Amino acid sequence: MAKNNDVESFLENIHNTVYRIDNTDEFKLSKRQKIILSIIQNIKPARILDVGFNYFKFDLLLKSFDFSPEVKLLDLDKNRVSLAVENGFDAFQCDVSNENLPFSDSYFDVVYAGEIIEHLFDTEHFVSEVKRVLKKDGIFILSTPNLAAWYNRILFPIFGIQPFFTEVALHRYYGRKPFKRVGGNPVGHIHVFTTKAIKEFLNANGFSIKKIIGYPLKEKNVFDLFFASFPSLSSGVIIISTHQ
């Protein structure tokens, strides 16, 4: 059994080993990020919080919108936060799984959490804090992989393949032969949702779902692109919600 400090060390270094924070020059917008930017462009919020930010160029695009939003960043990785501050961002280190967000009540118009909730131990604490820092008419934009993606519905019940997005160990994947994940190492998924589960979870924690959008993980895969039109079957989902 892994000790708690082993798990914490693993999670703190996820961004260094998987997202490669020093490789921002090779940044390319994903379909998911394009959708998020379009949503935010339409909302035109004055204040945006990006939780678990990945690349500065995405947040530079947020800051460059013609309505000039105030953009703040949060992440667990102190190296990533330091690098963001060095590059002129208002960034803060915070373990959103068990710490309170370092902002006052009703501060943000939009909170965006892209591919982060599946990495958290206490998801309920996190969304309660999101609700606290959002204005009453604020928007919570959350994206996460979909456990019930079309391929998991085939590979798990028929062939017994360990469902994609789930992980049984810290350092290697098991149960997926002959499939391999690009990148090689687990990325620290702790809680994985189906579309039905994330809807129930958000509703139970004080949010009203306004829209759910599917997105592909493999943008050159025609099947993944096709099933992205059906959120319950898509590789990932974007959920737009507000206070109930």
Image (cartoon, rainbow, N blue to C red):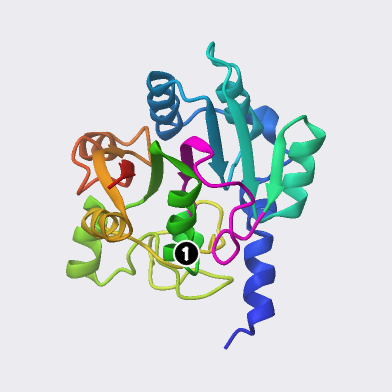
Principal SS element in the magenta part?
A: loop
Image height of 3 relative to 34, above or below: below
Image height of 27 relative to 53, above or below: above
Which residue shows up at 31% across the image and 47% down it? 235
Residue 15 in the image: state x and y as whole percent.
Answer: 65, 52
Q: Which residue is mark 1?
A: 125
Q: Which stretch appears magenta?
A: 94-116
Element at label 1: helix
Q: Point out the residue furthest to the right here.
A: 86
Image height of 111 relative to 158, above or below: above
Quadrant in the picture for the N terminus = bottom right
Query: Which amino acid does the dot numbered 1 rest on?
Result: His
Which residue shows up at 23% across the image and 59% down it? 200
Residue 244 in the image: state x and y as whole percent.
Answer: 27, 47
**Quadrant position of residue 58:** top right
Tell me, yes or no, whether the highlighted magenta stretch contains residue 62: no
